[in-house]
Amino acid sequence: MKAHFLFCSLILFTAVVPAQPIDRIDPLLREKLNGMKDDEIAQMIIVLADQVDVNAMRRAFDAVHATKHERHYQAVTALQEKAAVTQGSLLGYLAGQRAFGRVESFESKWIVNMIFARASKGTILEMSTRSDIDRVTLMVRWCWMHLLMNRQPPRILALPRQT
């Protein structure tokens, strides 16, 4: 009886206490947003939650001894298809916000399933609550210089390594 009461209490507690929202905004972008007005524009990278599992793909290629050509074709196709299937809703949202002047521009990318965008603080905050987004990071020029010089993304762009 006591165990039943504790179990029911736990269920009731989890149903009544609201879940904490997930903070998908990178600390660098959050710092910039804190000093901005709601209608000011920031340049950002929106990384979608659904990504191609490239490590699993690599293992599958190795298992069948795929040629370079087969690996390239299948990897590029999978990455482009993932972006095409998962970005539509977010691209539609950004287009709608652009019609209201809250988004200046946006560009779809597929090598990493992400979108580059220039949007208002209010739009960024609203968008960061979407479940299809993994994180929103500040777009800074040194990211690309770092990538070119070190052949690996800076920490703020690095995707978690899947094992």
Image (cartoon, rainbow, N blue to C red):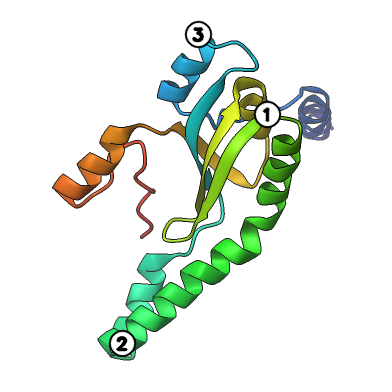
Alpha-carbon span between mark 3 and mark 1: 18 Å
89 left or right of 36 in image: right
Quadrant assignment for the N terminus: top right
Label whose residue precedes the other's in the sequence (3 or 1): 3
Helix, strand or loop at label 1? It is loop
Which of marks 1 and 2 precedes in the sequence?
2
Counting residues from the N terminus, which is met first, the one under dot 2 or under dot 3? Answer: 3
Amino acid at dot 3: Gly
Amino acid type for the residue under numbered disc 2:
His
Using a 10 Å C-alpha cutoff, classify the residue at mark 1 as few (fewer than 14 neighbours), some (14 to 19) or many (20 or more): many
Provide the residue designation for mark 2.
69
Q: Nearer the viewer, mark 3 or mark 1?
A: 1
Q: Which residue is mark 1?
A: 102
Circle 2 residues within 10 Å: few <14, some 14–19, many ≥20 = few
Which of these two is toward me, 120 or 20?
A: 120
Q: Residue at x 22, y 41 (%)?
A: 145
Residue at disc 3, secondary structure: loop
**Judging from the image, what secondary structure is the residue with disc 2 in?**
helix
- Quick check: 53 left or right of 144? right
Percent coordinates x, y for residue 75 in the rendering: 41, 75
Q: Return the x and y of residue 32 as percentages of the image width and height.
A: 46, 16
Which residue is tagged 3? 35
Q: Position of residue 116 (x, y in %)?
A: 49, 43
| Cα gap from disc 2 to disc 3, whole angstroms | 49 Å
The answer to whether residue 48 is seen in the rendering is no
Give the number of the mark in front: 2 or 1: 1
Real-space Cα distance between discs 2 and 1? 43 Å
Looking at the image, which residue is at 49% across and 73% down?
78
Amino acid carrying label 1: it is Arg
